[in-house]
Image: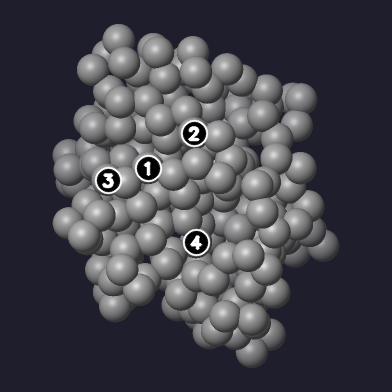
C-alpha cells in the first residue's frame, strides 16, 4: 500500500496511508493559494511545527470537527489541551508511536508565537515513519548543520523543505539541506503564498535533479505516491 503525499499550498501537507490521514500545519481558509478549505480535509492526526498563524490557523476547527489528535511541542499541545482537544505533547528528540507508525520531533531554527503574541514553545520539524517510508517535514527553519545528523539517523524518502527565503532558508540553502539529508526526493514548501516569499519551484526541482535528487514541484491539490 502506497503512502500518498498531498500538497495544498504553503506548508500545508497531508500524508495518507490506508485509513490514516496525517495533516501537517493546516492553513486553508485564509490561505490564498490553497486548493480547498478546512472543511474538506478529515485528518486522524494533526502535526504542528510551530505556533505561527500560517501553520496553525485551522488546527482547532479541524480537530473539533474530526476529533483528530494534535501532536506538537509541550506549549502548543497544552494550548490546545486547555481547549478540550486531544493532544500528544512532545519535545525535541522525543518520539511517539501512533497507530500509523512513529513520529519524532526534530530541531528547527525559527521563532514560534501564537497570533495573540503568547509563547508557542520552540519551533520544530518532524520525522515520521509510515507505511515503510520515512518523511522529514522541516517546518519553518534556516539551514543548520544537524540536518547531516538527521540524514545519518534516518533513510529519508521525502524531505519537505521550505524555499521561500526571508522567513526561512531559500532555494540555495535548501539544495544543500537536501544533500546533507541524503533525501531521495524533496517537496518544496513555504513559498509563493505572498510576494516576499515568491520562488521558482520548477527551477529548484531542476537544480535538485542535477544533484541526483527527485524534485517534486507540486501545485496546490497535486499529489504523489511514494
Q: Mark 1: few, some, or many residues within 10 Å (few <14, many ≥20)?
A: some
Tag 2 near tag 1, CB within 8 Å = yes
Tag 1 near tag 3, CB within 8 Å = yes
Nearest to the observer: residue 116 or residue 207: 207
Q: Earlier in the sequence, mark 2 or mark 4?
A: 4
Camera-nearest label, 2 or 4: 2
Tag 3 near tag 4, CB within 8 Å = no
Q: Mark 4: few, some, or many residues within 10 Å (few <14, many ≥20)?
A: many
Camera-nearest label, 3 or 4: 3
Q: Quadrant of the N terminus?
A: bottom left
Residue 203 placement (x, y as % from top left):
49, 13
Q: Earlier in the sequence, mark 1 or mark 4?
A: 4
**Under tag 1, what secondary structure?**
strand
Residue at horizontal 50 percent and vertical 70 percent from the top: 43
Q: Is residue 178 above or below residue 4?
A: above
Q: Earlier in the sequence, mark 3 or mark 4?
A: 4
Mark 3, residue position:
226
Mark 4, residue position:
23
Residue at horizontal 35 percent and vertical 18 percent from the top: 208
Residue 224 got which mark? 1
CA–CA distance between discs 2 and 4? 17 Å
Residue at horizontal 44 percent and vertical 25 percent from the top: 174
Q: Is residue 168 above or below residue 172?
A: below
Residue 175 placement (x, y as % from top left):
39, 20
Nearest to the observer: residue 151 or residue 221: 221
Residue 21 relative to residue 123: left or right: left
One can see residue 88 in this view: yes
CA–CA distance between discs 3 and 2? 14 Å
Residue 218 got which mark? 2
CA–CA distance between discs 1 and 3? 6 Å
Q: Mark 3: few, some, or many residues within 10 Å (few <14, many ≥20)?
A: some
Amino acid at each position: 500500500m502506497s503512502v500518498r503525499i498531498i500538497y495544498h499550498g504553503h506548508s500545508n501537507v497531508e500524508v495518507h496511508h490506508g485509513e490514516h490521514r496525517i495533516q501537517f500545519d493546516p492553513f486553508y481558509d485564509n490561505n490564498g493559494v490553497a486548493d480547498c478549505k478546512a472543511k474538506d480535509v478529515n485528518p486522524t492526526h494533526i502535526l504542528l511545527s510551530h505556533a505561527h498563524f500560517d501553520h496553525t490557523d485551522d488546527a482547532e476547527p479541524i480537530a473539533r470537527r474530526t476529533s483528530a489528535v494534535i501532536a506538537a511541542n509541550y506549549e502548543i499541545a497544552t494550548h490546545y489541551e486547555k481547549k478540550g482537544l486531544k493532544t500528544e505533547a512532545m519535545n525535541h528528540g522525543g518520539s511517539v508511536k501512533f497507530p500509523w507508525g512513529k513520529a519524532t520531533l526534530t530541531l528547527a531554527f525559527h521563532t514560534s508565537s501564537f497570533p495573540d503574541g503568547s509563547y508557542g514553545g520552540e519551533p520544530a520539524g518532524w520525522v515520521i515513519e509510515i507505511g515503510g517510508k520515512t518523511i522529514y517535514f522541516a517546518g519553518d527553519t534556516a539551514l543548520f548543520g544537524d540536518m547531516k545528523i538527521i540524514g545519518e539517523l534516518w533513510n529519508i524518502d521525502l524531505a519537505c523543505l521550505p524555499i521561500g527565503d526571508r522567513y526561512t532558508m531559500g532555494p540555495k540553502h535548501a539544495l544543500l539541506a537536501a544533500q546533507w539529508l541524503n533525501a531521495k526526493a524533496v517537496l518544496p514548501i513555504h513559498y509563493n503564498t505572498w510576494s516576499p516569499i515568491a520562488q521558482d519551484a520548477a527551477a529548484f526541482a531542476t537544480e535538485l535533479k542535477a544533484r541526483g535528487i527527485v524534485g517534486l514541484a507540486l501545485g496546490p491539490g497535486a499529489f504523489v505516491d511514494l
